[in-house]
Amino acid sequence: MLNARKFARFVVKRDILINGSIKGKALDISESGMLIHSHIPFPTGSEITLEFSLRDADPLMRIKAVVQHVKMGVGIGIRFHDLPEASLARIRTFVSNFCDKLTEHRKKVLLVEDSPAIRMMYKGCIEMMECEVREAADGNEALEKIAESRPDLILLDLYMDGMDGFQFLEVIRSDESLKDLKVVVLTSAVGPDVKDRLAPFEILDFLTKMMTTPRRFAEKLSSYLS
C-alpha cells in the first residue's frame, strides 16, 4: 500500500522557507515531493533546501530537493533528494493519514481540453482550490470519465479533435441522468455566434482563455462550486 501511495498527492497549505530566506507556501505533498508556490521561478534542475513543518505543533524539517518542473503562475514542482529516514517516516505517516480519511468530501472537477499545456496550467489552479481534478482530451474521453465518477463541475473547451464541445453538450443535455451537470465553457473566444449556438445548452458561464487571470479563475471556480 505504501508504494501505491508514494506518488499520491494531497493538498496542504503550509508556509515553507526556501534556501533559508525565500518565503513560499507548500500547496500539495506526496512521499516523493511537493508543489510550492513561490514568486521566484527556480530553474528546472535547481537544488534547493526546504524548511517546513507538517503540522503546527511539529518541529521543523530541513530537506534537500530538486526542482522538477515549473508551472507559471502556480509554482514549482520539487522532488525530495537524499531524504533522511526519519523525515521520510514522518512524511509517510502524514500522507498515510490523508489516505485513510480521503477525499470523499472534495469537489470533483472534470477538465475537458485537448491541449496538455493548458490542462496542466488550469489543473494547478484547480488543485489549489482543494478540488479533485480529472482530465479528458475530448468529449468521448469526458463521457468515459463521467461514467466512472460524476463531477460537480465540468470545464469544457469547445474546439477539440474527436468529439468537440458542442457535440458533447448535445449528448449530456439529451441524457436524463446527465442533463443537470454544471458546465462552464473555457475557450479562446466567445463571440455572439458562439453564444447563440450554446444558448440551448444552459451553460453556467463562459471563461476566455489567456484573458482570465489565475486569481479571477479561482474566484469564479469558488462561486461555481459553492
Image: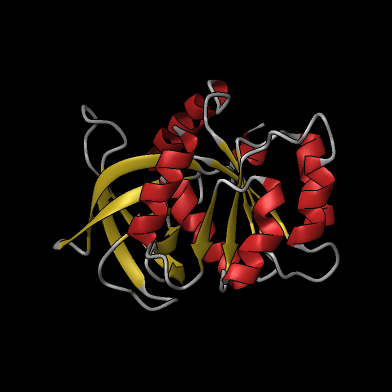
From what the image shows, is residue 170 above or below residue 191?
above
For the point 28% across and 42% down, the residue is 14
For the point 66% across and 62% down, the residue is 196
From what the image shows, is residue 55 above or below residue 160?
above
From what the image shows, is residue 107 above or below residue 8?
above
> Tell me, what colour scheme is on the image?
secondary structure
Residue 174 horizontal/vertical position (percent): 84, 40
Residue 184 horizontal/vertical position (percent): 58, 51
Left or right: 32, with 42 as reference point: right
Looking at the image, which is closer to me, 29 or 183?
A: 183
Looking at the image, which is closer to me, 14 or 220?
A: 220
Residue sticking out furthest to the top: 101
Looking at the image, which is closer to me, 94 or 144?
A: 144
Residue 189 horizontal/vertical position (percent): 56, 73
- Report if residue 153 is visible in the image: yes
Left or right: 205, with 115 as reference point: left
Residue sticking out furthest to the left: 21
Residue 130 horizontal/vertical position (percent): 45, 39
Left or right: 226, with 146 as reference point: left
Query: In the rendered view of the protein, which quadrant contains the N terminus?
Result: top right
Left or right: 142, with 107 as reference point: right
For the point 76% across and 51% down, the residue is 169
Query: In the rendered view of the protein, which quadrant contains the C terminus?
Result: top left
- Report if residue 130 is visible in the image: no
Q: In which quarter of the image is residue 56?
A: top left
Q: Quadrant of residue 188?
A: bottom right
Number of numbered labels in the structure image:
0
For the point 74% across and 60% down, the residue is 165
